[in-house]
Amino acid sequence: MARRRSREPETAQITSVTHDGRGIADTGGKKVFVAGALAGEEVRFQRRKFRRNFDEAELLEVLQASPDRIEARCEVFGRCGGCALQHVTEEQQRAIKFQALRDNLERIGRVSPAEWLEPLVAPAWHYRRRARLAVKDVPAKGRVLVGFRERHAPFITDMHRCEVLAKPVDSLVSPLSELLAALSVRARIPQIEVAVGENATALVFRVLDPPTADDLQQLVQFGERHDVRIYLQPKGLDSVQLLHAEAEPEPLYYTLRDSGVRVEFDPVGFVQVNHAINEKMVALATRLLDIGSDDKVLDLYCGLGNFTLPLARQCKEVLGVEGDAGLVAAAERNARLNGIVNARFRKADLAEVSGRESWFCGGWNRVLLDPARSGAAEVVQHMRQTGASRIVYVSCHPGTLARDAGTLVNELGYKLQTAGIIDMFPHTAHVESIAVFTKNK
């Protein structure tokens, strides 16, 4: 007999928790995922979505709280989709992410490291220097909403500040809402890109209709009042223009102090979100590669040269490979800016690598990988051709890292030497990690 789909409140014990902060309760053989519930808690919940093998539920009340539960710092936590774990201590957040990494490596890759690294951590608030804020004119609320999407709905969260955005943008949510409400094109601005450098902050307004002269004046005044650069983007990324600039300003940049490298980046281009963690991550990856002055390094998915340029300071030669022509050009500019002559860059689609390319088979004894969430399956299967005896893999998805680790270890004879989490996105379910693979020649 089929189980009745009850929508009445229920009580259950939470047995475990997923990496995105959902507690798991087993009720009569069918698992229920309760958002916001923690392992060991007794809770009241209400089922909201019914699926074949599990249901999803809303947390109504915590009857017996876990010692890891804390008060969320943000007033819209639970509604805003930007964070998932503010109700958990920072230590337990990292424990959850570590467990996700370990489970994925064992279950998907059938591998386990010889040694675990300590989590890489930095301050957990006001860390996000790159973000996309959604914008929506909502006449019923009498406001233009600015912020992140809600967790369980496609609406924009009605928020006034953000505790994870880097300063000064953390406190600009309400001022931006007020600015947009005064513009004639308030209903024709769907998003604002945020980019915070060490030297300046940029706000890029996506405009679907041309702003009036009065609109432009108000945007300029906002920028001057809050000491931020205002850009308009009427079409594609190549249409981004700085508003009211008498002279071309210094590009946004960040520095990597260990290597003395300065990296310039575009307001709408890719950059690692967390500056403090990125600086530590680059230093850690460089150390784990164990490079010397005679080593040749292949840096795949190199982006702006975030790893390539610091590596060049210590090795004989490094080649950075990236599929985006704009990022390759930026990496070359950054090499010239830093006076680095032993780093080369090339554009190549790494999803189409055959393993026979001359640049791929260049006698590299070290390889660094930093792919997107989809991982590096196509590259990894040809790793023998590089000649690398040591690989450092930086990952933003534990599932694809585990898959690729399985290939390297179980098919190509590498050893998973060490692995660990990188807390790049505190309070979120995002799991960043790093792994080292070695092979005797």
Image: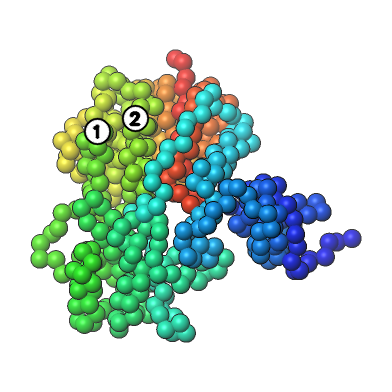
Residue pointed to by mark 1: 259
* Label of residue 195 in the image: none
Mark 1, secondary structure of its residue: loop
At 36% across and 23% down in the image, what residue appears?
290
Depth check: give the residue in front, 26 or 417.
26
Figure check: 60 above or below 324 = below
Q: Is residue 328 left or right of residue 20?
A: left
Residue 86 screen position, x and y as percent: 51, 54
At 75% across and 62% down in the image, what residue appears?
10
The quadrant the C terminus occupies is top left
Depth check: give the residue in front, 33 or 263.
33
The quadrant the N terminus occupies is bottom right
Residue 268 screen position, x and y as percent: 31, 58
Depth check: give the residue in front, 53 or 239.
53
- Res. 353 visible in picture: no
Which three-letter amino acid code belongs to the residue tagged 2? Thr
Query: How many numbered discs?
Result: 2
Residue 133, quarter of the rendered image: bottom left
Q: Mark 1 to mark 2: distance in Å?
A: 10 Å
Residue pointed to by mark 2: 286
Residue 137, quarter of the rendered image: bottom left
- Res. 78 visible in picture: yes
Looking at the image, the residue that sits furthest to the top is 441
Q: Is residue 407 left or right of residue 335?
A: right
Is there CB contact under 8 Å for labels 1 and 2? yes
At 32% across and 72% down in the image, what residue appears?
176
Which three-letter amino acid code belongs to the residue tagged 1? Ser
At 48% across and 52% down in the image, what residue appears?
427
Mark 2, secondary structure of its residue: helix
Residue 328 screen position, x and y as percent: 28, 44
**Disc 1 or 2, which lies upstream in sequence?**
1
Residue 134 screen position, x and y as percent: 41, 68
